[in-house]
Amino acid sequence: MNLFNSIKTHLVNHLPKIVNRSGKVSYSQSGEDLIVDYIMSGLKISQPSYLDIGAHHPIALSNTYLFYQKGCKGVCIEPDPLLHSQIKKTRKRDICLNVGAGISHETSADFFVMTSKTLNTFSRDEAERYQKYKNQKIEHIIQVPLIPINEIISDYFSFYPNFISLDVEGLDFAILQSLDFKKYRPEVFCVETLTYTEDNTETKIQEIIEFMISKGYMAYADTYINTIFVEENIWKNR
């Protein structure tokens, strides 16, 4: 098990939060929420709304719980019924949907529940790749409803969320490609841009970074695991 997975597993099992040297509390894997909070402050968005796709847990490893703690609210998407129930119980102010973010006209899809819940995925290829590692196996497969990201935004936000957190193990790029960027321009994205491995061969997913740049977003920060993108024109004209 590589360092990336070891840290991820330890945080989920033992730590609900991290306190950095300045005393600020982070619930994210590598302080991503504090970076996003700093960006929102710079943009003078005091109560950002959020869309958390692949929310996983209400608190641990969450890129949005810091904002929930500040009184903000948003939508959490979690396909795993057990994880969804935890989020719904803890994040009562949020809208919590037990669905996946669809990328086609399909209304449901197979969802692969892995040994490590952080690796749950709709991608059969990714699930089978994870299973090749001795620490992982497909525990079971369930059918989960799908709602396209544009429909989620249209149905649950007045305009669009200020912040989108995206971590769906293998389908992040496809979901981003399906987003109507002409209609919806969230100020900030946090996207997992590192492939998962257990043999230290992980690589950055450059196509996501290049795609976001092509849509008018700049890579504001990178924590190795995640890249934080900011709408470039909004940031330059803040």
Image (cartoon, rainbow, N blue to C red):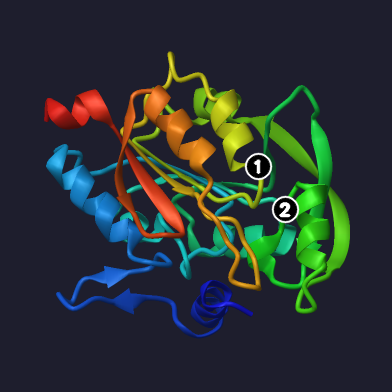
Residue found 36% across the figure and 56% down from its top: 68
Q: Work out whether residue 70 can be spotted.
A: no
Left or right: residue 49 compared with residue 234 = right
Classify residue 107 as left or right of residue 71: right
Q: Position of residue 149 (x, y in %)?
A: 58, 30
For residue 92, above or below residue 176: below
Residue 152 lies, with reference to residue 202, above or below; the image says above
The amino acid type, in three-letter code, at marker 1 is Leu
Mark number displayed over residue 96: none
Q: What residue sits right under mark 2 in the picture?
A: 121
Residue 10 placed where, x, y %?
53, 82
Query: Residue 87's x, y, as percent?
Result: 56, 60
Q: Earlier in the sequence, mark 2 or mark 1?
A: 2
Disc 2 marks a residue whose amino acid type is Thr
Residue 86 appears in the rendering: yes
Q: Quadrant of residue 55?
A: bottom right
Left or right of residue 135, residue 184 in this image: left
Is 189 in front, or is 65? 189
**Camera-nearest residue between 88 and 117:** 117
Residue 44 lies, in percent from the top left, at 14, 38
* Residue ID for mark 1: 171
Q: Give the quarter of the figure containing the C terminus.
A: top left
Q: Is residue 200 left or right of residue 143?
A: left
Q: Residue at x 84, y 65 (%)?
A: 138
- Is there CB contact under 8 Å for labels 2 and 1? yes
Say which element carries label 2: loop
